Amino acid sequence: MKKSKQEIADSLQGDWKEEQLYILQDEWTMYKNCQQRMISCDQKIEALLKTMIHKTPPIPRQEPITTKPVKEKNKHSKNAPNFDAAALSRDYFGVDLLRIEGVASNTVLTFIAEVGSDIYKFPTMKNFTSWLRLAPNNKKTGDKVFSSRTPKGKSIMANAFRVAANTVAQRKDGVLKKIFNRIAYKKGRSAAITAVARRLAEIFWIMTVRKQEYQPKNEQMYEEQIRRNVIKNIHKKIRSFGLTTEDLLLVTN
């Protein structure tokens, strides 16, 4: 609501017909009933998830990788369930998956429902992203890659990661946002969503399997890494063409 409560109250003053007031009252009753049904549904989901957690085999014990504490992000959302999804994530996997940019309660709940403890069956994050059909299917002839399209296929979990990637695209900052912008500039928005969705899947695997809390990369370090890669590629091009310093100075002049 952009208007204040007082402005809304003032706008409701007028000569209302009886049938209009009846319709308004009926719609308000329906709204409250829907809200109550949503609360009841959330309570049922929470109870089922807690039952699943108690039945789940113990979390594989690994040495956690220590990281600096991450500032808690605002997890409030108008569509969030009426229970603590972050607490369920910690109880189920030992980490808080809601710390990741773009990840909402629905992403975590889908992950628990669609993958759950089976995440420990994937020995590497590449196996996990391939199962989700988010990893490129590189086709080679000799040493040359002539196709790297992502395999087609329907996956509820992959779609959840794509929705989270689209949320990342709407953010103002962050390394994931920069990755999205860089790929979108080169290959388009669709390719960027798939790439960031794959990166989110890799982060989920690292956090749940290695028991490592999420620590976002430093944006300045990321920019420096991109700069070094560009310089490295330039040097590679210079060597491949056999160029010398004199050749480069001749071009600039």
Image: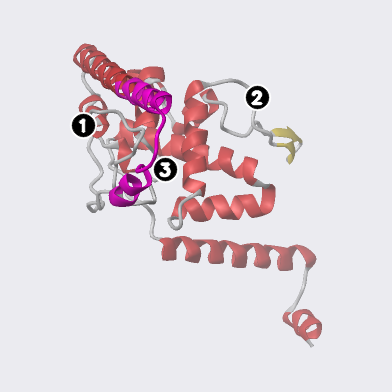
Which numbered disc covers residue 187?
none
Q: Secondary structure at mark 1?
A: helix
Residue named by callout 3:
102
Q: Residue at x 62, y 34 (%)?
A: 136
Q: Nearer the viewer, mark 1 or mark 2?
A: 1
The residue where tag 1 is placed is: 87
Please provide percent x and percent y for residue 140: 73, 34
Give the foreground label among 3 and 2: 3
Q: CA distance from mark 3 to mark 2?
A: 24 Å
N-terminal of the pair, mark 1 or mark 2, is 1
Please tell me whether the stretch drawn in magenta is mainly helix, strand or loop: helix
* In magenta segment, residue 4: no
Q: Residues within 10 Å of mark 3 (few under 14, many from 20)?
A: many
- Depth check: give the residue in front, 98 or 203: 98
The answer to whether 4 appears left or right of 246 in the picture is left
Above or below — where is 75 with respect to 242? Answer: above
Which quarter of the figure is the C terminus placed in?
bottom right
Tell me residue 237's x, y (percent): 72, 64
Three-letter residue code for mark 1: Ala
- Residue lying at 62% horizontally and 50% vertically, measured from the top left: 184
Q: How many marks?
A: 3
Residue denoted by label 2: 152
Identify the residue at horizontal 57%, vertical 41% (top origin). 193
Chain part drawn in magenta = 5-32
Left or right of residue 158: residue 249: right
Residue 175 image-quadrant placement: bottom left
Tell me if I can see residue 227 in this picture: yes
Name which of mark 3 and mark 2 comes first in the sequence: 3
SS label for mark 2? loop
Residue at x 50%, y 22% (from the top left corner):
156
In the image, 228: left or right of 234? left
